[in-house]
Amino acid sequence: MNSRIFYEAAGFLLGLLFGSFLNVCISRLPRNVSVIRPGSRCPDCESPIRWFDNIPILSWFLLRARCRSCGKAVSWRYPAVELGTAVWFTIQAARLHTVLRFYFFENSHSTPSSYAPSAILSNLGIFILGFLLIGLMVMDWQTGLLPDSFTLTGILIGFVLICFQAIFLGPTEDQVLLPPHSIQLTSVGAATENGNIFLTGPEALIGGRMLAILGAALLMLIIRWLYRALRHRNGMGLGDAKMLAMIAALLGFWPAMLSLFFGVLAASVYAVYLLARGRAKADSKLPFGSFLAAGGLLAAQIGDRIIDAYARLLR
Ligand SMILES: [Zn+2]
């Protein structure tokens, strides 16, 4: 049962279920309605949706995108969110398979499995980040709202995961390597890479992540303040600041900055497109949170490679 395809299939099915639940969150959270009760209902005629009409993706096609009771059209958003979440979970499940095989099967002599928790926990964080960002992307696009129940919960989850990572550090992850001569300092709980002269080990990991969260939120507040001072209107909601803090909590500071960069880039391209087509004026509002969420998704998948390449460039 250790084959990659098994993990991918399990990830896909789990993603479909979570995607289905995410649709309920997207429909109800911006209206402050419970996501638990009542069960799924048609938003138009309020008639309950039976289980066989509620199968992710499949039911939408079988019912030809219409409600069985009233015949009103059902948005393509529903199967799209289910498919998107399923694809995200498939990618992460494949990565989890790689991590588990690396630590527990192939290199179990050279890299003991006591190093595995860090990799597994950050993989879990990206699973959760994808769920939250896909939800926030659609909610901001449709309603202009970024509910705290997603952003603040995401910050909390990110922080708890990094605490677990600090608890389960591997044997030499409690050491600080000082380039260029790689002098090793060992202290009570220091960490390779994560340590520096001032903080080592778990303190560096947890303190660093706290700084990342606060730094990301503060940066967005400064941008918001500057925008208001220059344009005399609000360009960004507080939800955007909380979302960037959430990305920083789950990925770290630099991937969060990369998300912001991708988000600003995508929003600018879209704004220019709208202006060129005469479909927007200079003071039209854009759901920036949707672009930031898309940037976060991209950074979570390819951020490490870009940041590594950039760091090598500067060296
Ligand atoms: Zn209906």
Image (cartoon, rainbow, N blue to C red):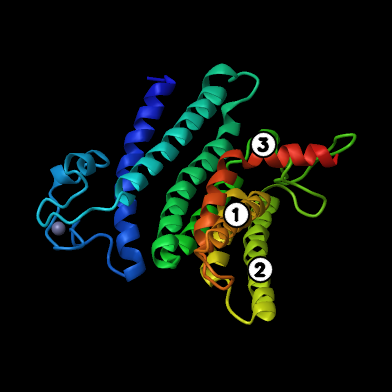
Residue 6, picture quadrant:
top left
Reply above or below: 214 against 67: below
Q: How many marks?
A: 3
Q: Residue at x 22, y 40 (%)?
A: 61
Marks 2 and 3, how far apart at CA: 26 Å
Indicate which disc, 2 or 3, sits on the residue closer to the N terminus.
Answer: 2
Numbered badge on residue 269 = 1
Q: Residue at x 9, y 55 (%)?
A: 69
Residue contact between numbered discs 2 and 3, judged by CB atoms under 8 Å: no
**Of all residues shown, which one is farthest toward the right?**
181
Helix, strand or loop at mark 2: helix
Answer whether labels 1 and 3 touch (C-beta < 8 Å). Answer: no
Coordinates of residue 106 in the picture (x, y in percent): 56, 17
The residue carrying mark 3 is 305
Image position of 50 (left or right of 278): left
Left or right of 233? Residue 65 is left
Q: Is residue 189 visible?
A: yes
